[in-house]
Image (cartoon, rainbow, N blue to C red):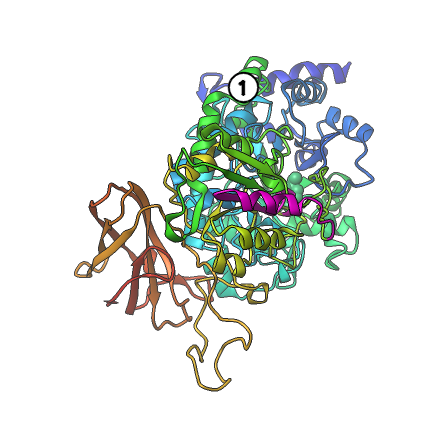
Amino acid sequence: MKTKQRFLLIPLFVFLLSNSTIMGQNTTIDQKVDSLLSLMTLEEKVGQMNQYNGFWDVTGPVPEEGNAATKYEHLKKGWVGSMLNVTGTEEVRKLQKLVVEESRLGIPIIFGFDVIHGYKTVAPIPLAEAASWDLEAIANSAKIAADEASAVGLNWTFAPMVDISRDARWGRVMEGAGEDTYLGSQIAKARVKGFQGDDLSQPNTIAACAKHFAAYGFVEAGRDYNTADIGTSTLYNAVLPPFEAAVNADVKTVMNGFNLLNGIPVTADKNLQRNILKDKWGFDGFVISDWGSIGELVPHGYAEDLNHAAELAANAGSDMDMESTAYITHLVNNVKEGKVSEEYIDDAVKRILKVKYELGLFDDPYKYCNEEREKERLYHEDHQKGVLDMAKKSIVLLKNEGNLLPINKNQKKIAVIGELANDNNSPLGSWRIGSDDNTAVTVLEGLKKYNSNITYSKGPKVFNSDANFLMDVEVNETDTNGMQEAVALAKESDLVVIVLGEHGFQSGEGRSRTQLGLPGLQLQLLKKVHEVNKNVILILMNGRPLTLPWEAENIPAILETWQLGTQTGNAIAEVVFGDYNPSGKLPMTFPRSVGQVPLYYNHYSTGRPNYQPNVFWSHYSDEKNTPLYPFGYGLSYTDFSYSNLEIDSSDQENIKVSVTVTNTGKFEGEEVVQLYLHDKVASVTRPVKELKGFQKISLAPNNSKKVTFTLTDKELGFYNNNYEFVVEPGEFGVMVGTNSQEGLENSFVKK
Ligand code: NOJ
């Protein structure tokens, strides 16, 4: 009898809390959260801090404790705050109904998923998008992803990944914005805005998640899940700013990570999560652990057992436990035993409930379960246009000797070679778990729309055909079957378009590599083709920088196309046939050799930076120090010249730097004008240069534009080792140019 009364009364109260007035009074979300919290038992509070994986898709190791029967039981008790990997309006509705109707308080759950580069309609991988340096297009791509994800019941994406990384061996570089903190911060903001929009309660916006807090991009030797050990200056100046930018853009959630940072697992790092994120930056959303990362405190040698791990993570400020079952099993006892204060629990639960209110889940728990929208929005025509636009902008022209590109639309006898040219799965990239396999437009299909004089030869097998998200990709190293046929075709053709690279599943989570060259027999194939035909256009597909010294030296035209998603073939064809003039710029340095890694443009100077006629200077005896292609590099079908670099530092709070850019070539084109600064002498040494501004401009042939940058203390300052932002007087070098190594230089003095 008593229980029944509760069932009737409390959900009614929760419903009333959802309305903007209670008994004639305006209530803020905070007030509603407080009222609801006051009704909750300790078990229910801890339940909100528990996230379970769904019953089908798996994106990490599955814990024994989390079987389906227990999960259902806990859902009914209100002991689950969120589910991940449950998609589709029908499934989401089913679970939401279970929770809302059967749990005592009926608090709706929030449904999360890795919507990393699109849901059904797949956008280019994030690293590719970063190559566009086009913040509007990137925000739009996230918006499209949110539109589709929200149509299948989801209201939370575990994106953007804002980890800065300088190590191309790490497979997850495909998921971020590359090596640069300034560019990464701008992109972090754009992605958060794209996912969340201006109003989170709209049915087509979803909560974003900045991850992985922090320094996961610095895993040693590029091996995933490995340790990170970095200095304070790198942490404060290189790693943290994109997270802070995401927080300033009102990101609703932050995910911690698997890695140790200087000996402490970040999931249990109180300084990072409580002191910096929540106190210093004022982050008022919630922190989700990474998959099982609370449980992993045990193998890290930081916690004795799962019970201890729950205590450490909760005290450190991890608000929600993804699939460790640590909180739901042990946190209540930890509180009862006085190891975790109930204040910490209340704080975590308030943060979680707040996001649920902001999403509008208390107004309508089924608001993301609109079956009509689900049918209408997936693969929508507008989304195809959006990702096509994004894909074209992501392409980087690395080389174009003799203007081999673009190809004449009436070109005779084109040979298209390479397994990847006819692959409709690999170009979808790694994190497209919501999409359908084999749905990319292939390069071959795209090119054939323009020109019918195309003959295709696959060449030797490269990858296993059933490569998937869960397993390492197998690469053929021995079977040369198909090689001869491809070379014969190249010989009798006027022009060869050869598509080579990595498989889409060779980068991404758990996919580190020690070799960064073209996998398998691809380089051998390329060399043989080049022997018989010099007119070779190499189209690269890869999820990370590759080492391509022979290719760069010998192949006249090279296009970096990454993995471009659903519209791959159409985007590449537009560029190859000249309907779109490429404008992308590398967001990561391409090394000459894997032995140079980590190689990045904003390094410090050594004490011995310059050539000496002996060995006693900082160099390799078998390789240059310089990259093959530097950060910020990318060509166009037209040419741009830079002149008149002027600096006006009379207003020290707004220093103006201007340059004139002229299109000296034959095509209309876009150029990313990049500004780099060097604080020449500082109390903590500053990198040799740092990107501090960029503008993407469009110019018709023979036209010029004056581009002006304004430098404030924000651009001139840095964090000292006490994490204080300081601006120090002295000389600053300025370089404005077309990439991180080429530009006009000057300097000014900050007084
Ligand atoms: C582990 C990954 O590190 C994280 O980025 C992802 O969001 C979760 N798995 C959930 O799939």
Which class describes the residues within 10 Å of circle 1: few (<14), some (14-19), or many (20+)?
A: many
Q: Quadrant of the N terminus?
A: top right
Instruction: State the image coordinates of residue 740 (x, y, percent, origin top left).
Output: 38, 59
Q: Residue at x 75, y 56 (%)?
A: 303
User: Residue 104 at x, y = what percent?
Assistant: 70, 22
Q: Does residue 649 appear left or right of residue 119 in this picture?
A: left
Closer to the camera in the image, 298 or 271: 298
* Residue at the extreme left of the image, as rendered: 650
**The magenta segment:** 478-506
Asked if disc 1 is less than 8 Å from ligand 1, the answer is: no
Question: Would you say residue 338 is visible in this rendering?
Answer: no
Between residues 654 and 575, which one lies in front from this camera angle? 575
Q: Which residue appears at 65% of the width and 50% of the height?
A: 315
Residue 566: x and y, percent?
Answer: 54, 31
Tally of numbered discs: 1
Residue denoted by label 1: 363
Q: Does the magenta segment cover residue 491?
A: yes
Kindly give the residue lying farthest to the front in the view shown: 492
Q: Amino acid at mark 1?
A: Asp
